[in-house]
Amino acid sequence: MKISLFILLGTTVVQFIIALFSGSVALLADTIHNFSDSLTAVPLWVAFVLGRRVATRRYTYGYGRAEDLAGLFIIAVVAISAVVAAWQSIDRFFNPQPLHNLWWVAAAGVIGFIGNEAVAIYRIRVGQKIGSAALVADGVHARIDGFTSLAVVVGAFGVMLGFPLADPIVGLLISAAIIVLLWGTVRSIGQRLMDGIEPELVDRTQSALEHTPGVLSVSKLQLRWVGHRLQGAATVVVADTALSHAESVAHEAEHQLVHYLPNLDDFAIRTVTTAEDLKPHSHDG
Ligand SMILES: [Zn+2]
């Protein structure tokens, strides 16, 4: 995680310096994109610092949601920076300016490509090793960003060949790419703030509960992310037996879940007997 952050930040600093003295808006847009990608490490950092705090009498569920709030802050920063990059590119169509040091601009694009590809290889390798689909997806994102940086090289060569509009055109395309990627982030953070969960995780939890000896069926199941930890609750139907037996079934079910869901923090299990389950009670679908 830290290695990826330092590679991306280093790439961003080099690109930013070259963007300043060359006047290339395409490179500026790519720099803003790479910088906002390094910012995505901030929610993880917030989670690391705040998420370890114990719950208090005021924040009885702990501080996990601080991660999602940090995500909202990043969305705002990235949205503003994308608008700035797009505005600079559009302005350049009407007020063309000569570019300097085009070979440096091309070199900065190549540096952006190498930096992103290095991060992509690292994330995909580690993601496949530890079986994290999210990390592999981050790696694929970095690989796409590498090709975005190559667009800067194409733009620089276009200007060299006597087509000065190539630079703002590439700048606009990269700004559009930032907005498209940002929309994905808006959706996933919005989903978490709405207590949305991946249905596969619910399926896995349900099958873990159903495979616990003594559990006849699952009548209610809830899961939600609080930061990058899971919380949930379930009502399971057990055979009509002594209370102590029902308790041991619930205990065993909890034990099963910890194996199926490594991120699970807290899971409340309520047991009802077959007779109780037959009584009319409210369902939420
Ligand atoms: Zn990106």
Image (cartoon, grey):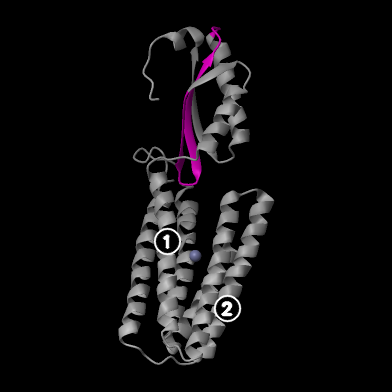
First-in-chain label (1 vs 2): 2
Whole-Å distance between the Cαs marked 1 and 2?
23 Å
Badge 2 amino acid: Ile
Report which residue position mark 2 lands on: 111
In the visual, does 277 lie left or right of 59? right
Q: Is mark 2 on a helix, strand or loop?
A: helix
Q: Give the percent coordinates (x, y) of residue 53.
A: 45, 46
Q: Which is more toward the observer, 177 or 197?
A: 177
**Residue behind mark 1:** 180
Do we see residue 63 in this rendering?
Answer: no
Q: Looking at the image, which is closer to me, 199 or 12? A: 199
Q: Which stretch is magenta?
A: 220-242
Callout 1, which amino acid?
Answer: Val
From the viewer's side, name the closer residue of 101 and 7.
101
Q: Residue at x 50, y 75 (%)?
A: 12
Q: x, y (%) of residue 103?
A: 54, 89
Residue 271: within the magenta? Answer: no
Task: Determine whether the residue tagged by mark 1 lies in a helix, strand or loop.
Answer: helix
Task: Name the disc covering residue 144, or none.
Answer: none
The majority secondary structure of the magenta stretch comes to: strand
**Which percent across, then down, holds residue 147?**
56, 71
- Residue 202 position, x and y percent, is 52, 33
